[in-house]
Structures are given as structure tokens and as C-alpha cells.
Image (tube, rainbow, N blue to C red):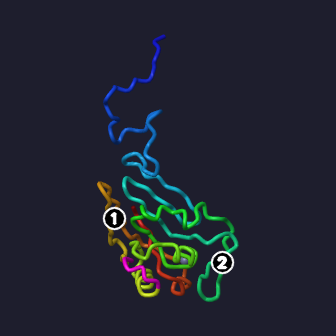
Amino acid sequence: MPHHSPTPPVPGKPPEPGNPPEPGNPPTPGKPPKGVADIQFIGNATLLIRYGDLTLLTDPNFLHRGQRAHLGYGLVSRRVTEPALDVTELPHGDLDAVVLSHLHGDHFDRVARRGLDRGLPFITTPHGSRLLKGLYGFRRAAGLHTWQRYTVYRGDSTVRVTALPGRHAPGSARFLLPPVMGSLL
Ligand SMILES: [Zn+2]
């Protein structure tokens, strides 16, 4: 039976970019292999997505367990789990944009609001962007109508966000709640 052994590395030849990591050739920390998105689940709808040179955050919720999210009309929702990361542990210098489905207390809370840079672009609904800019000073918030696109760049990496139709609640309850969008990345 022939004996197979791993191909030895060619001396002096650097690994080609885009190849899957090999033993002894770990990927750069924080940067996934080319063409691969690395997604960290923080809790609720909050994800930290790394793709190439880009780092995106979705629906930032950083309340701690037991704290209450305010949902309007006196409704509150108490957080039952701790987020996987504290807002201070985010890679703030790497963040390129926040994708926000809607501006509502259980998708964007006061801890996130205080902890995020005011110059960070938010890609969200027109309703959300108006309030983010006018009320909270996130000056680069952008409001997308359904099917509109927003492109985020860094280095050689590009992510296009397309706003998708979304509905917050069934029936007439949706008229009492903030408008919502889906997003295709
Ligand atoms: Zn909501």
C-alpha cells in the first residue's frame, strides 16, 4: 500500500493567498481566508461579520442579562442571556458599518448607543437613519428603501447590502411599530 504523506512546503515559496490554512500556517487572527465570512454570534440578532478586510456588525444589542429593553408604549423586555461580547470588547478600530434592521430597543439599545463611534455608518431604514442622525448624532446613518443598495469597501474587499421587504408584526399592530427591513449581504 503506497504511503501518503502531506506535501512538504517548498522552501522559499510563500503560501498562496486564498488557500485554506494548513497545519503550521495559521490564518491571520481576525481575518478569515479569502472568500470566507467569519461570523461571530453575540446574541439576539447581533452578529460580528468579518469578510476579507471588512468587519460588519448587525443589530447591536449589548444590554446585560437582567437589563430591560424599552419597546415603546410602556412595553419592556428583560434580557435573559448575557451577550457573548461586551460593547467595549468589539474591534472598534476595524468596524466598517452597522447593518440595522430597524431602530427599536431590542435591536439597538442604550448600551450599544453609548458604546459605538458616532462616525460609524449605519445601514438601515429611512426612519432609523433619521432618528440615528437627528436624535443620537450618528452622522453617517443611511436610510435605504426596499431594494436600494449600499456598498461597503475596505482594501480589496466589498460587501453590498440590499434592503429587502420586511414586516415587523402581523395585521394593524405593524403601524404602531418602527418600519423594518431585511438585508441581503
Ligand atoms: Zn422591533
The tag earlier along the polypeptide, 1 or 2, is 2
Amino acid on which disc 1 is placed: Val
In the image, residue 138 lies in the stretch drawn in magenta? yes
Relative placement, left or right, of 86 versus 149 is: right
Compared to residue 94, the image places residue 13 above or below, namely above
Question: What secondary structure is the magenta-colored segment mainly?
Answer: loop
- Residue 107 drawn at (x, y percent): 54, 73
The quarter holding residue 74 reads bottom right
Compared to residue 11, the image places residue 124 above or below, namely below
Q: Nearer the viewer, residue 113 or 102?
A: 113
User: For the residue labelled by badge 1, is the local secondary structure a helix, a strand or a loop?
Assistant: strand
User: For the residue labelled by badge 2, is the local secondary structure a helix, a strand or a loop?
Assistant: strand
Q: Write the residue at 39% across / 61% down.
A: 185
For mark 2, does the 10 Å Cα neighbourhood hold few (<14), some (14 to 19), or many (20 or more) residues?
some
Q: CA distance from mark 1 to mark 2?
A: 32 Å
Q: Quadrant of ligand 1?
A: bottom right
Numbered label tally: 2
| Region of the chain picked out in magenta, as a range | 136-141
- Residue 144 drawn at (x, y percent): 36, 76
- Residue 68: which disc? 2
Q: Write the residue at 54% across / 87% down.
A: 176
For mark 1, does the 10 Å Cα neighbourhood hold few (<14), some (14 to 19), or many (20 or more) residues?
some
